[in-house]
Image (cartoon, rainbow, N blue to C red):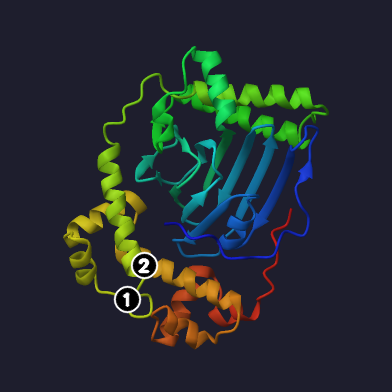
Amino acid sequence: MPCPPPTLPPPADGPTPLAAPGAWRWTARTDDVDRHAHAQPDWHQRYEQLSPGRFQGLVQHVQLPGLRLVREESSQALRQRGDLGTGAYGFAMPLQQTEAAIFNGQRVDRDAVMVGRSEELDLCSPRDFRLIAAVVDADLLASLWERMYLKPLSPWIRAQLVLPARPAAAEALRSLHQAAMATATGDGAPLRDELALRQLRDEVLIEWIEVLPPQVDTSELSRVAARKRLVDKACELMLSHTDEPLSMLEVCQRVGASRRKLNYCFQDVLGTNPVKYLRAVRLNGARRDLRGGGLAVQDVAARWGFWHLGQFSRDYKAQFGELPSTTAGHRDHRSPSG
């Protein structure tokens, strides 16, 4: 199960209100994956940095009545888990990606739409990844769906799916979504009243619905879910022995899979192999402990199974662009800038 993100102090300044009650906008530039997770108001997420190098991110949210529009950028490969609240559905699409992303064990190409309930999000994104997303209240989506199609909301939308979109429709959606965010935030001609914001909301939401294919095949979901369960079980097992990491043979024996099968499932679900993933997660865990304070570098290294302090320092600097001692010396947890 996804863990909640580490506790960080609240941003120095909150979201900026818009014309409608409960509507607001928010922008944050981030330099750390935990700050990146924390910079997304009201959501509970956890990020792990999977690729080496300094992290740079951007989060933009526009909350309209019943609908949140999102634009997100990240410079490093990530695994993002968590939930965006109950009673809602999410839609997302890449803006830019160097290679395919993976959403709940399914490949995401450029003109693909991620869709499903807002809980239990699991997205692995490559370096230099940008996406747009919309999170809509279930009642609003159901009402608009019935008006458009004269039938109840399709049951498949409750799953976590990757669906193909027509390239022309996908490009039109990207343009409209970004233009709507710019308009609502005042980067374009700003909207000054509640009715205009609601009209903008409906226009964007209709475009997200219409980009979905007319027919949806869910026959592969059970196979995808089985692979993901195996990977989640192996991850839970490996992370329960961080101070003395298990060998891959021990992991395979305990989860009941061959090494070849486990590697195959990890590549399908996380885009990497078990050894690389475990190493990245352990380094992320060490970074959180160093930023939390109270432990010496050598104690943190031992806690996460890094027994050679020199090698730990080299691996840590390669992963995050700074030495462990530098992280330990900057424990102010500066808030993301809005």
- Spatial separation of the CA atoms under disc 1 and disc 2: 9 Å
Q: Is residue 75 visible?
A: no
The residue depicted at 74 percent of the width and 53 percent of the height is: 338
Q: Is residue 4 visible?
A: yes
Give percent across and percent down for residue 67.
63, 33
Please state which amino acid type lies under the numbered disc 2: Leu
Q: Residues within 10 Å of mark 1 (few under 14, many from 20)?
A: some
The residue lying at 77 percent from left, 60 percent from top is: 12
Is label 1 in a helix, a strand or a loop? loop
CB under 8 Å between callouts 1 and 2? yes
Q: Circle 1 sits on which residue? A: 245
- In this view, which residue lies farthest toward the top? 150
Residue in view at x 41 percent, y 82 percent: 311
Q: Nearer the viewer, residue 72 or 99?
A: 72
Tell me which label, 1 or 2, sits earlier in the chain: 1
Most foreground residue, 244 or 138: 138
Where's residue 177, x and y in %? 62, 31
Q: Name the element at disc 2.
A: helix
**Residue name at image x 42 percent, y 57 percent:** 1
Three-letter code for the amino acid on which mark 1 is drawn: Pro
Q: Residue 170 placed where, x, y %?
A: 50, 27
- Residue 168 in the image: state x and y as whole percent: 49, 22
Crowd tier of the residue under label 2, counting other residues whose Cα lies within 10 Å: few below 14, some 14–19, many 20 or above = some
Give the total of numbered labels: 2
For this view, does 97 lie left or right of residue 215? right
In the picture, the disc for residue 42 is none
Residue on which the image places disc 2: 278
